[in-house]
């Protein structure tokens, strides 16, 4: 099996890519690599603000997903609503995204009335989930540094959220590494879905493969750590932070969290929890979903941190 995978994929891998990840995943790597070249699984998640009453047939929903509220109202792609309808207010009926992203965002456990910061919010799928959870009295700041991605984020929010909910959402374009200095100890919940290696995306695009270097992960990890420190600063005492990436590199996942815990362990602790899905794998400091052990979901990594009083 391994020789078949290498013969099929090695010609298009960036120099050093195979060795770099084989060192981390060992005998699992050939199967995981093959899964990265498969189409990424997406589902259509129903918009809870959509006008008409949604009464889908139970035969169209995989009821086994209902154990997790984040994906309990998502369709499988085979029976998805491929062309979402709009209601009388122009809101779209469903949003297509990776179920692993839903699970990671739901780990923030936003409560009605919370002040929420989404530090790197584009394209907007996780922000929609947070907006549903914060209730009519909550506040969401959706930040995105890139002007192009920020414009897309605004469009997504406008297409899926009613005007009364948009009044409680602010879209910004700040350098998030300095956020803790501007609004210290302010947010009940902070989501940091950090820019990362995104290896599945890299392998799918020739230009991205040409740009990949073995040292890229280390460079990204430095910025990710700066962002996570800013998230800790912006979070209020007794608040919660979810650090997430779509990276495979352990340096960008547990490595970033471990560095924070070593340097600022007096300020935060890992939050103990469990996930019912068998495909959610525990790591030293968090959880991950990888496409070879799920239904093509991910990669997605997340860690839950609680800020000490």
Image (spheres, rainbow, N blue to C red):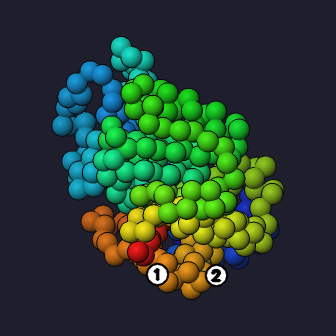
- The numbered dot on residue 284 is 1
- The numbered dot on residue 214 is none
The answer to whether 6 is drawn above or below residue 149 in the figure is: below
Direction from residue 65 to residue 309 in the image, left or right: right
- The numbered dot on residue 23 is 2
* Quarter of the image where the N terminus is located: bottom right
Q: Count residues near mark 1 (Cα–Cα under 10 Å), then give few for <14, some for 14-19, many for 20+.
A: few
Direction from residue 165 to residue 261 in the image, left or right: right
Q: Work out whether mark 1 precedes mark 2 in sequence or the reverse, and give the earlier one.
A: 2
Direction from residue 148 to residue 186 in the image, left or right: left
Q: Position of residue 110 (x, y in %)?
A: 36, 53
Could you say which is closer to the camera, residue 51 or residue 200? 51
> Which residue is pictured at 34% across the width and 40% down the height?
137
> Which residue is pictured at 57% across the width and 32% down the height?
154
Does the residue at mark 1 contact the one at mark 2 (Cβ under 8 Å)?
Answer: no
The answer to whether any part of residue 16 appears in the image is: yes
Cα–Cα span, label 1 and label 2:
17 Å
Q: Count residues near mark 2 (Cα–Cα under 10 Å), then give few for <14, some for 14-19, many for 20+.
A: few
The answer to whether any part of residue 5 appears in the image is: no
> Which residue is pictured at 46% across the width and 56% down the height?
187
Q: Position of residue 140 (x, y in %)?
A: 46, 44
Could you say which is closer to the camera, residue 309 or residue 256? 309
The answer to whether 85 is drawn above or below residue 107 in the figure is: above
Q: Secondary structure at mark 1?
A: loop
């Amino acid at each position: 099996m391994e020789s078949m995978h290498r013969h099929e994929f090695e010609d298009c891998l960036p120099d050093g890519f195979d060795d770099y990840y084989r060192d981390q995943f060992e005998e699992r790597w050939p199967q995981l690599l093959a899964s990265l070249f498969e189409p990424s699984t997406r589902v259509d998640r129903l918009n809870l603000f959509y006008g008409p009453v949604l009464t889908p047939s139970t035969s169209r929903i995989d009821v086994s997903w209902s154990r997790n509220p984040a994906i309990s109202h998502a369709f499988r792609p085979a029976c998805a609503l491929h062309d979402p309808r709009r209601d009388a207010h122009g809101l779209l009926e469903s949003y297509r995204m990776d179920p692993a992203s839903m699970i990671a965002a739901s780990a923030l456990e936003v409560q009605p009335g919370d002040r929420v910061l989404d530090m790197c919010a584009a394209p907007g799928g996780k922000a929609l989930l947070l907006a549903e959870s914060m209730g009519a009295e909550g506040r969401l700041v959706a930040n995105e540094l890139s002007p192009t991605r920020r414009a897309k984020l605004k469009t997504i929010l406008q297409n899926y959220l009613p005007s009364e909910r948009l009044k409680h959402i602010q879209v910004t374009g700040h350098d998030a590494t300095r956020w803790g200095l501007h609004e210290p100890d302010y947010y009940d919940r902070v989501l940091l879905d950090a820019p990362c290696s995104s290896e599945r995306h890299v392998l799918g695009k020739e230009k991205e493969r040409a740009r990949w270097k073995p040292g890229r992960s280390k460079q990204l990890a430095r910025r990710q750590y700066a962002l996570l420190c800013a998230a800790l600063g912006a979070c209020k005492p007794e608040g919660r932070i979810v650090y997430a990436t779509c990276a495979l590199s352990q340096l960008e996942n547990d490595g970033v969290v471990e560095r924070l815990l070593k340097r600022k362990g007096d300020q935060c602790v890992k939050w103990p929890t469990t996930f019912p899905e068998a495909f959610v794998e525990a790591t030293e400091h968090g959880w991950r979903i990888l496409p070879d052990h799920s239904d093509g979901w991910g990669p997605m990594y997340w860690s839950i941190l609680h800020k000490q009083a």
